[in-house]
Image (cartoon, rainbow, N blue to C red):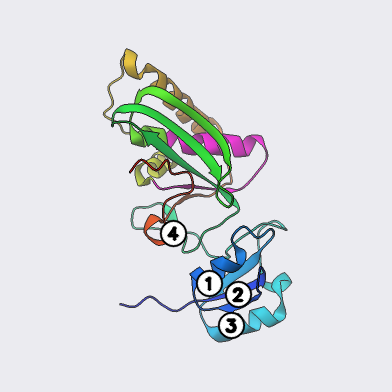
Amino acid sequence: MAAKQKYYVVWVGRKPGVYTSWADCQEQINKFDDAKFKSYETRAAADEAYKAGWKKHWGQGQGKGKVSSGSSFKPSSSGVETTEEIDYNSISVDVGTSGNPGPVEYKGVDTQTGEVIFSKGPLKKGTNNLGEFLAIVHGLAYLQKIGSNKTVYSDSVNALKWVKQKSVSSTLVRDESTKEIWELVDRAIEWLKTHSYSNKVVKWQTKQWGEIKADYGRK
């Protein structure tokens, strides 16, 4: 079944206009400060929105000056939130491991620029999923500290579920070699249970968008 055609309006970007592919739209807005763009189901709706201007259509329900694709967030079949387009007003997190279990490190980066915002590790011994979980919670705590409602992207379905459930399900044995990561996980769970946040925590669509910006390149 063919994917439904979408139309992309770029009001503010390298070359404003209406585009028929997400790739063409991305060329106009990627790394463009204060880009304003949104997708529409029909050409007529896109043309009308473009003519009306961004003030009537872009960023409804969002703060002024934020980069937003205008796409809606929805749950996937796995129960985690996904989007059809990248929200560049976000941070992306990922983990790097050497063996599973093995040494673990993680980092968070600006999705648009790739600039490293925070990093942790390597921790002596842990698993990929626990590292992904810690990265998401670290990202949420960091954003709350600076008063930001940016989206957090992760490519780990398991870690996203754990964050939502405020608990983890891991077979990693608790012993002296794993004490460091388990202490951090316990603290992260406690943080989730005692803090609220408005940030969206969303699945990065690797098949559509390529590797997440925080990827360590160890595949």
Left or right position of 24 against 13: left
**Which amino acid does the dot numbered 3 rest on?**
Ala
Q: Amino acid at mark 1?
A: Asp
Counting residues from the start of the chain, the first of labels 4 and 3 encountered is 3
Residue 43 painted magenta: no
In the image shown, does 24 or 195 lie closer to the viewer?
24
The picture places residue 124, in percent across and down from the top left corner, at 37, 21
Q: Earlier in the sequence, mark 4 or mark 1?
A: 1
Residue 24, labelled with which disc? 1
State the SS at label 4: helix
Which quadrant, please, contains the C terminus? top left
Q: Residues within 10 Å of mark 4 (few under 14, many from 20)?
A: few
Q: Is residue 43 above or below residue 218?
A: below
| Numbered label attached to residue 209 | 4
Q: Amino acid at mark 2?
A: Val
Residue named by callout 3 = 45
Which mark is first along the chain, 1 or 2?
A: 2
Q: Which numbered disc flags the more N-terminal residue, 2 or 4?
A: 2
User: Of 36 and 213, which appears nearest the observer?
Assistant: 213
Q: CA distance from mark 4 to mark 3?
A: 26 Å
Question: Which quadrant of the figure has residue 170?
Answer: top left
Residue drawn at (48%, 24%) of the image = 187
Of the two numbered discs 4 and 3 in the rendering, the one whose residue sits closer to the viewer? 4
Q: Position of residue 12 (x, y in %)?
A: 69, 69
* Label 3: element kind: helix
- Say which mark, if any, is on residue 2: none
Q: CA distance from mark 3 to mark 2?
A: 10 Å
Residue underneath mark 2: 9
Badges 2 and 4: C-beta atoms under 8 Å apart?
A: no
Question: Does 109 sit left or right of 146 as displayed?
Answer: left
Give the CA separation, mark 3 to mark 1.
Answer: 18 Å
Spot the residue most to the top.
176
